[in-house]
Amino acid sequence: MSIEVLLMVLLVASVFSGLVGFFLSKLLRKEESQRVPQVDLEKVELEAKHILQRAQAQAEKIRQDAKEETERLIGITKEEAERYRKLAKEEAESLLLRAKEEAHRIKEEAEKRRRETEDFIAEKRAELQKLEQSLIQKEHQLERRLEVLERREEELYRREKDTRETERQLERLQRELEERLNGILQKEKEVESLRQKEILELQRIASMSMEEARAEVLKRAEEEARIDAIRVMKRIEEEAKEKAEFEAKRIITTAIQRLSPEIAINYTTTTVELPSNEFKGRIIGREGRNIRTFELLTGVDLIIDDTPDVVTISSFDPLRREIAKEALQILIDDGRIHPARIEEVVNQVKKEMDEKIRKMGEETCTELGLYDINPGLYYYIGKLYFRTSYSQNVLLHSKEVAYIAGLMAGELGLDAKMARRAGLLHDIGKSISHELGGSHTDIGIELCKKYGEPDPVLNAIKAHHNEEPVRYPEVALVCAADALSAARPGARRESLETYLKRLEKLENIVKSFKGVANAYAVQAGREVRIIVNPEELSDEEAYVLSKEVARKIEEEMEYPGQIKVVVIRETRHVEYAK
């Protein structure tokens, strides 16, 4: 702006100097052309002075206007400069703000990338730890397998040793039998000789005929032979039983030691804890509307007594109790307890319970390694959890039978998977027998046929209640495992009346035999002790009596596990020294 002012001043000066030169040149030309006197020149000078003064005045005025204009332009320039300075400052602040935001964004991105990097490193570190744990577990599994192989090798060596020992015993027994046979032949000759002498003597003394004497001798020989046969049979049977019992105990003990089942006994009541006692009034509702609605929809009885912060659910059906328990827990957590809400919650729990039951059956099959069972059976398997037999949970009982049968099958080199399958499904009919009615074995057969189960499973369902003979070795193991699971202490519970009737029937069966003086059922009916008259029964006859009693008990009674029969025969001679 200062350059424009300077140009304005120069322009004014040039205009002024041009006017002055114009007037001067005009005066000179007029002087030269007219040649006026001296007086005119003075007048002209005077006029020129006036003109010069006017020109100076005009120049001063122009200079003053130029100064004012310059000041005005300078003010405008300052304002413009101030405005531009403010704009530049605002622009600088805006750029600084954007630069700060960009720096903050870059910093956040860097922090985010740092966190992502740390998360990635942590994830990889966790994967490495899992891999290390997996390797450790595999190493432990290999060690366990090596231990199992070592134990099996020791077992095979022991069995081979037992086999050699058995062969030696058989050879020894064969030699003994040959020696005894030779002795018997020799004795037969002696007996024949003595018989001839005895016949002659009997004929001479008793005046018997030969036929009568022969009948008498044959009778005596038959009695002696029968007693000898009983003794030999008893000895052989005891040896075989001892060996078989030892092997059976070893297999069963090994199987049970490898199994640690949970004991679950279901009763007819379930308790639900309350946050406070005021919920009891809300559960009952006005004039008992809430509790009546709940009992009607669930089919259970709610017992609300003086017990603090507890409500008891009573029902013989475990499934109803479970539905009622979950529904009541949801209502307590929600806090809204009225008939409409109760109906909504109970219906919701019933819908969810079917899926829960099916999932429970699927998890059971997966736990036992039975991946090829038809999924249609999952629901019935899971429903066994809500069924009881003598208060024993049927699903846990079936799992226990499956585990024991599978372990024993593995020990014997049989199909362990088939044994587990048959053990799991042997009581499958109990899942719906209470709904359809009829025998749970018949219902179980129909279910398993419907879903394509193999014949050993069908045989196990029938055979474990002696409704048909055992056709597969795995089924025999299932029957044994079923008896073991039912006979385990604390597994089952029965009423006092049924228990007393069973003991009374057991004693009556024993007392019905000839020669029994008294009988006592001990150990909760798992053993019966028989006192016989020594004058009526010999030791051999007492041995035969124990077998006959055991056979009759098996035919006429139903009982869990097994009953030990003990026959006691003793003779006492008492005398007093005086």
Image (cartoon, grey):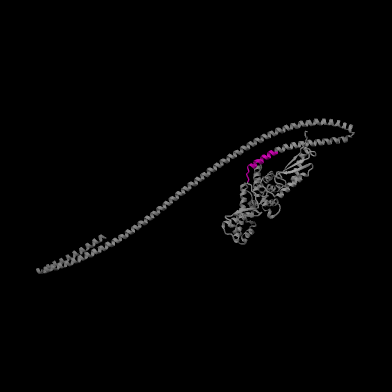
Q: Is residue 318 left or right of residue 16?
A: right
Report whether 102 appears left or right of 226: left
Q: Position of residue 267 (x, y in %)?
A: 65, 51
Q: Residue at x 71, y 33 (%)?
A: 169
Q: Measured from the top left, where is residue 435 in percent x and y? A: 68, 55
Q: Is residue 534 left or right of residue 291?
A: right
Compared to residue 135, the image places residue 100 above or below, namely below
Identify the residue at image location x=51%, y=45%.
127
**Residue at x 19% of width, y 66% of height:** 57
Q: Is residue 253 magenta?
A: yes
Asked whether 46 or 340 is in front, the reply is 340
Hey, which quadrant is residue 176 in on the image? top right
Residue at 36% x, 56% y is 93
Q: Quadrant of residue 315?
A: bottom right
- Residue 331: tell me if it is visible: no
Q: Is residue 230 left or right of residue 409?
A: right
Q: As drawn, which residue projects farthest toward the front? A: 578
In the rendered image, the quadrant that contains the C terminus is: top right
Q: Which residues are magenta?
A: 244-261
Q: Nearer the viewer, residue 179 or 304?
A: 304
Look at the magenta stretch and give its main secondary structure: helix
Residue at the right extreme, as displayed: 207
| Residue 34 percent coordinates (x, y) | 11, 69
Q: Nearer the viewer, residue 68 or 431?
A: 431
Q: Position of residue 563 (x, y in %)?
A: 72, 43
Number of residue marks:
0
Q: Is residue 173 magenta?
A: no
Inspect this view and state whether residue 436 appears.
Answer: yes
Position of the N terminus, as image quadrant, is: bottom left
Q: Is residue 201 above or below residue 533?
A: above
